[in-house]
Image: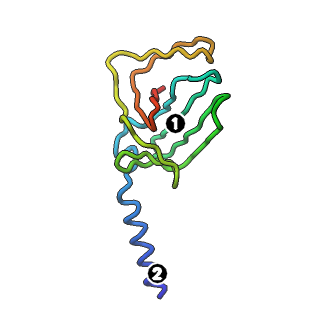
Amino acid sequence: MKKTALYILFFVLVFSSACKKLVVDENSDFVGVWKTECFGEGCNQHTLIIRNDNTGEYYTDGQNLEPVSYKGKVRINDNVLKIGVIHKFEIDQVPTEENDSIIIYCPCHYGDVYNYTWYMEIDGLRYYKQ
């Protein structure tokens, strides 16, 4: 009985992880620090960090956003980016390089202007690579 349970557990683990690809293997353009533009009166911003070792984190910052923070292994399955076991994000646009820089003015950072050449869209928000 114990052997059968171990075999079943082994096959479940193999098949459940086989469909999810590591981010670096699937598309290394995802690796980096990604941030949304500042928006709202509270200078709200979403940040997504994906490292070369396929770990990452996601957090929100701002006066008008509920603080959220996730950490874990980052994987891609179809058009879903997953951090850890249960945190899922719909990929609307994979990382894309623009020929011209995208200039974002963020009044919360004392008028700093940032130049970006990569963007992606996740859960309806546009993220820019730092």
Residue on which the image places disc 1? 48
Upstream in sequence: badge 1 or badge 2: 2
Residue 53 placement (x, y as % from top left): 47, 45
Residue on which the image places disc 2? 5
Three-letter code for the amino acid on which mark 2 is drawn = Ala
Question: Are the two marked residues, 1 and 2, in contact with CB atoms closer than 8 angstroms?
Answer: no
Quadrant in which residue 112 is drawn:
top right
Q: Which of the numbered marks, if any, corresponds to residue 117?
A: none
Extreme residue in the bottom direction: 1
- Give the camera-side residue of 81 and 40: 40
Residue 70 placement (x, y as % from top left): 58, 45
| Image: 125 above or below 26 | above
- Give the camera-side residue of 118 and 91: 91
Extreme residue in the left direction: 99
Three-letter code for the amino acid on which mark 1 is drawn = Leu
Secondary structure found at label 1: strand
| Image: 126 above or below 7 | above
For label 1, the crowd category at 10 Å Cα-Cα, with few meaning under 14, some 14 to 19 and many 20 or more, is many
For label 2, the crowd category at 10 Å Cα-Cα, with few meaning under 14, some 14 to 19 and many 20 or more, is few
